[in-house]
Image: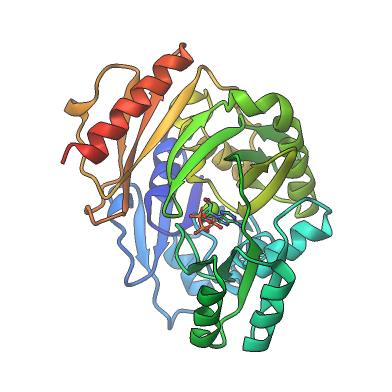
Amino acid sequence: MLIGIIGGGQLARMLAQEGQSLGARFSFLVEPNEDSAPVEGLGEIVVHNAEWDNRTIFEKLGEPQVITTEREAVDTDLLQALSEFCRVAPDHHAVSVMKNRTNEKQFIESLNIPTAKFAIATTKQQVIDGAAKVGLPLIVKSSENGYDGKNQWRIKTDQELKDFIESYSDLEVIMEQWINFQTEVSMVATRSLNGKMAYYALTENVHQNGILLTSVAPATQWQKKFEQTAQSYMKTIMEKLNYVGTMAMECFIAGDDLLINELAPRVHNSGHWTLTGTECSQFKNHLLAIMGVTLGNTQAKAPTAMLNLLGKEFTEDKLPDSSTSLNWYNKKVKPGRKVGHINILHQDPEQVTQTLAELKNKVYLDD
Ligand code: ATP
Ligand code: MG
């Protein structure tokens, strides 16, 4: 089966790598300014030409049986148009809900699922009113084009609010209550074409400057209290959207509450541990779902962790032992850029924690 992927980054790369064992072939639609090195050698790379009509795009991709996306910042009209030629999963509606924070927040609220208090603003006056409604401290996020902590402003003081209001002009934003969370967790799940759900273990995440740094799974400390709730949120959301494929949900744990921070209509960085930590990774299950095949086993094999390589070169010879493995994305190293990750898998959870701490020091302190 030929699968067309929109995007040519590391998520597309890992999807294609995981698809080899399923006998799937791939083509990639990339933008002219996009670095497609991660998917080199994994299938046809098609550089999007703005003059092409939808049929031409479909033909250039080799007339795939299914089209999917590695990112939410995608033209949802194009997704809709392509669905006339083949299955597109997840579909344009699911992606349009999650690519825009305003849509996403309103969607979560409409399902009565807890999320941080928020206000939507598109004018200066609405920013002023929104701040009064939400209260300080707060965080402002642009409705679209935000990832890895980009296009976000953290506002703690009246002065910072004043400065923000002064500099603000006509950007659609959401203003969100600042949550003093105990920790951040996420869940990745896959829904099949016939509506079967497969959940991965609740995962605990640490971010640095808004970018994911480490994930540990299963999040044993929080599983008992929150895993079922997380699963029920995922089920409600995915059923409502008739979602097909893998999606991710990032949450805050605050007291007794599990609040959704954001959703992603795609495989997710906090699910990279599944490549070594489960029989069937988030990538493989995404492909099985969109191909219309029975989903695989998502059970965690053992305690596992993932360390992101953010702007840091790393080679296999630096790995401490066989409990660790390197996944390098074939990208040029630039400051802060996600260029690879290391997974750790060990029967002893303390060993996982210790190896993670050692590797973190090695990557980030040994310069
Ligand atoms: P991603 O790359 O995960 O898509 P993003 O740039 O879209 O990230 P968020 O996930 O919304 O942005 O925010 C990044 C991080 O900033 C969160 O993981 C969290 O650590 C922090 N953060 C975001 N919103 C809040 C909030 N309301 N209260 C406290 N911290 C927050
Ligand atoms: Mg996030």
Q: Nearer the viewer, residue 102 or 244?
A: 102
Q: Which residue is rendered at x = 26% and y = 47% of the image?
A: 330
Residue at the extreme front of the image, as rendered: 158
Q: How is the image coloured?
A: rainbow
Measured as percent of width and height from the top left, residue 264 is found at 59, 53
Asked if residue 89 shows in the view, the reply is: no
Task: Count the numbered circles shown.
Answer: 0
In the rendered structure, the answer to whether residue 62 lies left or right of residue 237 reads left
Quadrant location, the C terminus: top left
Instruction: From this view, report whether residue 103 is shown above or below residue 211.
Output: below
Q: Which residue is rendered at x = 48% and y = 60% of the image?
A: 147
In the rendered structure, the answer to whether residue 142 lies left or right of residue 198 reads left
Q: Nearer the viewer, residue 159 or 62?
A: 159
Measured as percent of width and height from the top left, residue 82 is found at 59, 67
Q: Nearer the viewer, residue 251 or 298?
A: 251
Instruction: From this view, report whether residue 123 is shown above or below residue 141.
Output: below
Q: Which residue is rendered at x = 60% and y = 28% of the image?
A: 296
Asked if residue 28 shows in the view, the reply is: yes
In the rendered structure, the answer to whether residue 233 lies left or right of residue 362 reads right
Measured as percent of width and height from the top left, residue 328 is found at 28, 40
- The image quarter containing residue 76 is bottom right
Instruction: From this view, report whether residue 281 is shown above or below residue 186.
Output: above
Residue at the extreme top of the image, as rendered: 347
In the rendered structure, the answer to whether residue 347 lies left or right of residue 183 reads left
Measured as percent of width and height from the top left, residue 113 is found at 79, 50
